[in-house]
Amino acid sequence: MVASVNPLKQTRRLVVKVGSALLVDAKSGQLRRDWLTGLVADLAALRSMGTDVTLVSSGAIALGRRKLGLSRGLLKLEESQAAAAAGQIDLAAAYSNTFAEHKVPVAQILLTLSDTEERRRYLNARNTLSALFRMGAVPVINENDTVATEEIRFGDNDRLAARVAAMISADALVLLSDIDGLYESDPKQNPSAKKLSLVHAITSEIEGMAGTTGSDMASGGMFTKLAAARIALDAGCALAIADGRRANPIATLADVNDGTWFIGDETPQQARKRWINGTLKIEGVVRIDDGAVKALRHGKSLLPAGAIEVSGKFERGAPVAINGPDGREVARGLIAYDADDARRIAGKRSAEIEAELGYRGRAALIHRDDLSLTSRSETLPGRKESL
Ligand code: GLU
């Protein structure tokens, strides 16, 4: 069944995840260059139309094990870490060279689970990725397998891709693999099983359909794909499980739309606002002047110049309340400085930050993307603090 909605048609910020089984030939352990060329052509075309494109690619371990002469079968942790280190450099080179044919710069980013969980590091990564998008580059991301040991790693790039999509407020994430969608029952056991075209929520019924579908090269089967879908939906991002085995997999998906889409009812912006304004526990307060209140209501960032007073003890990236001169909350946001530095630059112009702190910090005290205005009803006394 073909879905009537096709988020790929209107995506402005897209993440594509590529599994090892697609990129690396199972028998020879070699990169499948023709396939890669088609994928890169699709992504370069989207990039040239102004879509922010991010690629989360597996394949480092599969490539590296051949390079290091590691035999088939299960690798020990340090062996797979060594294989990842050896394979990643070739993987990155292949992407860099192939995108270069389209004059698209590629940037490599290796992340660990904690980079997407700790707010400070998460915000740094988010800022770097935003800068790369402005410069027209395509970030190529993989897990930093060298430093990630069993208990602190994603282990599968499905969830890593979903965390990345949430981190950058992507509106669509496509998981390309040798699984072409979610079926009502395992199509290997039941050839007449129906593929779902659209899912709105991960119910227990949906979970029951996941079964144990998977291929032996990839670490993520349907289970991790559903976990990824849950993360994506919570971030307002649509997710597709789609067939990656064909040439030009993204252009084909845009055309025939035959995968399974998971689509929730929020936009990434609404989800982020809900996260900032509803979920996080406030660690400090910034009181701002009338001019800054107006600027915020017009969708601007909060500059240090607009801050009158900073109270609380907090680290960079902490959620803070932003109150007007009368003490009423006007917004909440993630602050770009720790409490001491925020106090030092309050009331100063952005150009004075470096002289005051001795380092070149960010121009905004709270960037507009990290801000969420508090609606009038929420500013009434008695608003409950959530943990
Ligand atoms: N990070 C691993 C690699 O590049 C792959 C993880 C996965 O297959 O999802 O080889």
Image (cartoon, rainbow, N blue to C red):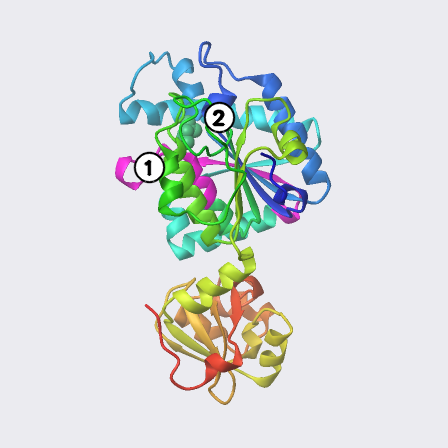
Asked whether the viewer can see residue 247, the reply is: yes
Say whether residue 160 is magenta: yes
Helix, strand or loop at disc 2? helix
Q: Which of 143/304 is in front?
A: 143
Asked whether the viewer can see residue 112, the reply is: no
Q: Amino acid at mark 1?
A: Ala
Furthest toward the right, the residue is 49
Would you place residue 207 above or below residue 370 in this image?
above
Query: x, y percentage for residue 268?
Result: 54, 55
Furthest toward the bottom, the residue is 326
Furthest toward the front, the residue is 192
Residue drawn at x 45%, y 49% as measured from the top left: 201
Q: Name the quadrant of the N terminus.
A: top right
Residue 332 placement, left or right of 213: right
Residue drawn at x 53%, y 65% as measured from the top left: 354
Using the numbered discs, state the Cα–Cα distance from disc 1 to disc 2 in whole angstroms. 17 Å
- Mark 2 neighbour density, 10 Å: few (under 14) some (14–19) many (20 or more): some
Whichever of callouts 1 and 2 sits on the residue coming sooner in the sequence is 2
Residue matched to label 2: 89
- What stretch of residues is rendered in magenta? 133-162
Helix, strand or loop at disc 1? loop
Q: Which of 319/218 is in front?
A: 218
Residue 289 placement, left or right of 281: right
Q: Name the quadrant of the C terminus.
A: bottom left
Q: Amino acid at mark 2?
A: Ile
Residue matched to label 1: 148
Query: x, y percentage for residue 65?
Result: 38, 17
